[in-house]
C-alpha cells in the first residue's frame, strides 16, 4: 500500500485554520462584546468540529487501500479533498505504469535465449536470468549479491571482467561442461554498472568445424587424382619421343580414369548440395516401384559383370510418390555399394515390399560387412571404414550421405544392419503416405 502525505495535508489545512481562530478570538476580546464573543466562539467551535470531522475522514481515507474514492465533502474542503485525490491517483498511475514496464523488461530478460547478469560496481550479482544460471552454473537462490569472479573462476573470464576492455567478446569453454562453448560480452551502462551477456556458441563452432573438415576433405579428394593426372601428363610430355603408342595409351587411359573419378566426385557433391539446400521432395511424381527396382538390378548386374549372383525379390508393387531421379540415385548407390564391398562369388539381394504399413526397399549382401562401431557414422560425408578399399573401387565417400538425404526428403528411414565377414543389409522404409498400393 502506498502511504499518503498526511503531514502535508495537516499543514495545509490546520495551519490557516488555527490562525483564523486565533485572529477571531483576539478581535472579539478587543471589542469587549460578550454576545459577539459568544457567537464567535460558538461559530468557531462549530467550524472546528466540522474541520476535525473532515480531517478524520481524510485520515481514514488515507489509510484505505490505494484507489478508494476520496470522501465526498461540500464546499472548499471538498475541492481540497478532490485535489489531493487527483494528485494521489495520478502518482499511483505513474508508479503502476513504471512497475508494469519494469515487470515486462524483467519478463523479456527472463525469456531471452541468451544469459543476462546485472553487476553492481563491486562485481556482485544484482540480477540474472535462468539462461545465465545455466551458462555459468549459478543458482539465483543463493548466488545473488555474491561476487561473480568468485563464482566463475576461469582465469580468462576473471581477467576479461577485470580488464575493462570489452570491445571484443570473450569465447570460453564452460568449466563443468567442457563441450559447451560460450561467447561472453560485457556491456557498460549507467556509469559504472555492467551487464554480462552470454551465448552458447557450441552449435556454431560445430558447424564451423564441419565446414573446415568438409573443405579439407574435398581438397584432399580432388588433390589425389589431380596429382596422378598431372604426373602422367608430365611423364608423357618429357618422354613423348621415347614412348611407344601402347605406353602412351596406357598413361592416357590411367589419366582418364582419374579424371572420371574427379568428375564423379564433383557430380556427387553437386547432388548432395542440391539435396541439402532443397525443400522436401514433392509428392507429384508417381514412381512405379517395381520398374524402378528392376532398373536398379540391371545397373547392379552391369557393374558386377557376372562376379556376383544378383537376386530380385518383389513382394507387392505400387507407386512411390516422390522424385524419380533422387530415388533412383539412392537405390543405385546402395546396389553399387553391395557390388563394391562384396568379393567375387558373393550374393546380392535387391527387393521391394509394399503393404498397409508403407513400402520397403532393401539391398542385402554377404560381403565384407561393417563393424558396429562404424554404423552410426556411415552417412557422414566422406566417412569410410576402409579408405583404401573405397578408393580402389571408385568410391567417393558420399554415397550413403546422398542416400540418407534422399530418404529424409521423402520422410523415409534408413536402417543398416551389418556384421563383419557376414554381410550387410540396407533398408529404406517409406510411410504409407508415400506409397500408393498397386
Ligand atoms: P564410398 O564411396 O566410400 O562407398 P559410401 O558413403 O557409399 O562411400 O559408404 C561409406 C562407407 O560405408 C564405405 O566406405 C564402406 O566402408 C561402407 N559400406 C557401404 N556399403 C557397404 C556394404 N554394402 N558393405 C560393406 N561396407 C559398406
Image (spheres, rainbow, N blue to C red):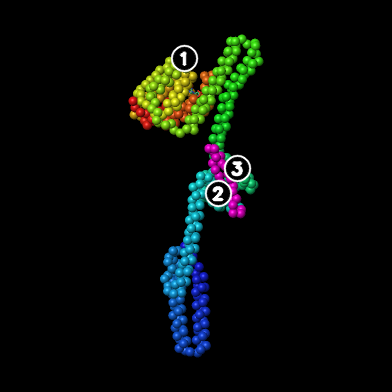
In the rendered structure, which disc, 2 or 3, sits on the residue that comes first in sequence?
2
Residue 276 in sight: yes
- Which residue is denoted by mark 3 in the rendering? 170
- Which residue is denoted by mark 1 in the rendering? 305
Dot 3 falls on a residue whose secondary structure is strand
Give me the residue at 56% from left, 18% from top.
256
Give me the residue at 56% from left, 15% from top.
253
Select label 2 or label 1 by which is in front.
1
Give me the residue at 47% from left, 62% from top.
1
Q: What stretch is highlighted in magenta?
A: 179-204
Residue at the limit of the structure toward the right, as seen here: 238
Query: Label 2 to label 1, Cα distance in Å?
Result: 68 Å
Residues at marks 2 and 1 touching, judged by CB atoms closer than 8 Å = no
Is 199 inside the magenta-drawn segment?
yes
Residue 304 coordinates in the image, percent (x, y): 46, 16
In the figure, 93 relative to 276: above or below? below
Query: Label 2 to label 3, Cα distance in Å?
Result: 15 Å
Amino acid at each position: 500500500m502506498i502511504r499518503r502525505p498526511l503531514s502535508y495535508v495537516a499543514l495545509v489545512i490546520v495551519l490557516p485554520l488555527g490562525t483564523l481562530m486565533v485572529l477571531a478570538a483576539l478581535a472579539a476580546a478587543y471589542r469587549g462584546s460578550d454576545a459577539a464573543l459568544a457567537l464567535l466562539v460558538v461559530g468557531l467551535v462549530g467550524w472546528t468540529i466540522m474541520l476535525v470531522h473532515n480531517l478524520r475522514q481524510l485520515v481514514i481515507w488515507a489509510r484505505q487501500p490505494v484507489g478508494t474514492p476520496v470522501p465526498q465533502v461540500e464546499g472548499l474542503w471538498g475541492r481540497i479533498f478532490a485535489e489531493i485525490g487527483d494528485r494521489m491517483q495520478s502518482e499511483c498511475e505513474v508508479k503502476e505504469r513504471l512497475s508494469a514496464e519494469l515487470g515486462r523488461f524483467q519478463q523479456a530478460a527472463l525469456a531471452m535465449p541468451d544469459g543476462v547478469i546485472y553487476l553492481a560496481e563491486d562485481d556482485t550479482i544484482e540480477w540474472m536470468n535462468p539462461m545465465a544460471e545455466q551458462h555459468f552454473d549459478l543458482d539465483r537462490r543463493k548466488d545473488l549479491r555474491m561476487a561473480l569472479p568468485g563464482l566463475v573462476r576461469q582465469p580468462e573470464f576473471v581477467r576479461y571482467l577485470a580488464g575493462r576492455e570489452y570491445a571484443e567478446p570473450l569465447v570460453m569453454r564452460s568449466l563443468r561442461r567442457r563441450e559447451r562453448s560460450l561467447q561472453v560480452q560485457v556491456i557498460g551502462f549507467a556509469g559504472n554498472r555492467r551487464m554480462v551477456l552470454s551465448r552458447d556458441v557450441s552449435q556454431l563452432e560445430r558447424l564451423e568445424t564441419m565446414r573446415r573438415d568438409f573443405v579439407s576433405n574435398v581438397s584432399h579428394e580432388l588433390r589425389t587424382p589431380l596429382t596422378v593426372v598431372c604426373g602422367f601428363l608430365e611423364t608423357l610430355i618429357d618422354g613423348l619421343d621415347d614412348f611407344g603408342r601402347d605406353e602412351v595409351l596406357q598413361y592416357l587411359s590411367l589419366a582418364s580414369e582419374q579424371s572420371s573419378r574427379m568428375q564423379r566426385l564433383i557430380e556427387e557433391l553437386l547432388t548432395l548440395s542440391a539435396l541439402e539446400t532443397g525443400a522436401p521432395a514433392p509428392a507429384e511424381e508417381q514412381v512405379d516401384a517395381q520398374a524402378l527396382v528392376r532398373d536398379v538390378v540391371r545397373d547392379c548386374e552391369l557393374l558386377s559383370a557376372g562376379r556376383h549372383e544378383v537376386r530380385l525379390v518383389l513382394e507387392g508393387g505400387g507407386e512411390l510418390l516422390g522424385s524419380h531421379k533422387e530415388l533412383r540415385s539412392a537405390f543405385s548407390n546402395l546396389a553399387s555399394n553391395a557390388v563394391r564391398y562384396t568379393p567375387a562369388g558373393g550374393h546380392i539381394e535387391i527387393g521391394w515390399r509394399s503393404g498397409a504399413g508403407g513400402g520397403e526397399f532393401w539391398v542385402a549382401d554377404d560381403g565384407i560387412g561393417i563393424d558396429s562401431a562404424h554404423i552410426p557414422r556411415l552417412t557422414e560425408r566422406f566417412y569410410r571404414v576402409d579408405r583404401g578399399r573405397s578408393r580402389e573401387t571408385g568410391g567417393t565417400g558420399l554415397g550413403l550421405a546422398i542416400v540418407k538425404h534422399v530418404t529424409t526428403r521423402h520422410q523415409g528411414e534408413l536402417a543398416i544392419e551389418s556384421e563383419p565377414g557376414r554381410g550387410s543389409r540396407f533398408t529404406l522404409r517409406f510411410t504409407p503416405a508415400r506409397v500408393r498400393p498397386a
